[in-house]
Image: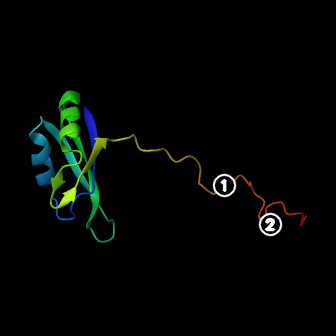
Amino acid sequence: MKNIFVGNLSFNTSEDELRQLFEGFGPVDRVSIMTDRDTGRSRGFGFVEMTNNEDGEKAITALNGSQVGGRTLNVNEARPKAEHVGGGRDRGGRGGDRHGGGRGRW
């Protein structure tokens, strides 16, 4: 299985169009275009899962930099989603000091 990131999509590109584009290189398992949660409008990127790794590599090589819908596609292997550790509240390593960041006030 090869998971492929497709960026710089036209906002009018449908999942069916994206599937057809990649099916020219081999079987496609799944296609998803990311949409804005509030408006439902395309965010201009998506993911394609191809059944075969070799077919996925061929598609990446052939389609990266190609023109689709008036846009130049950015196509590469998708990186695993980064895990968020903790609540993200510790900024800059200051710990729990909320009184000036160690400027001698205490």
- The residue sitting at the bottom extreme is 39
Type of the residue with mark 2: Gly
Specify the quadrant that holds the N terminus. Answer: top left
Specify the quadrant that holds the C terminus. Answer: bottom right
Alpha-carbon span between mark 1 and mark 2: 15 Å
Residue 13 sits in which quadrant?
A: bottom left
Type of the residue with mark 1: Asp
Please give left or right for residue 59 compared with residue 3 in the image. Answer: left
Circle 1 SS class: loop
The residue at which mark 2 appears reads as: 100
Q: How many marks?
A: 2
Q: Residue at x 15, y 55 (%)?
A: 68
For marks 1 and 2, the one nearer the N-term is 1
Circle 2 SS class: loop
Q: Nearer the viewer, residue 7 or 98?
A: 7
Q: Residue at x 29, y 71 (%)?
A: 39
Q: Residue at x 59, y 54 (%)?
A: 87
The residue at which mark 1 appears reads as: 90
- Above-or-below relation of 5 to 102: above
Image coords of residue 99 (percent x, y):
80, 66
Q: Residues within 10 Å of mark 1 (few under 14, many from 20)?
A: few
Residue 89 sits in which quadrant?
A: bottom right
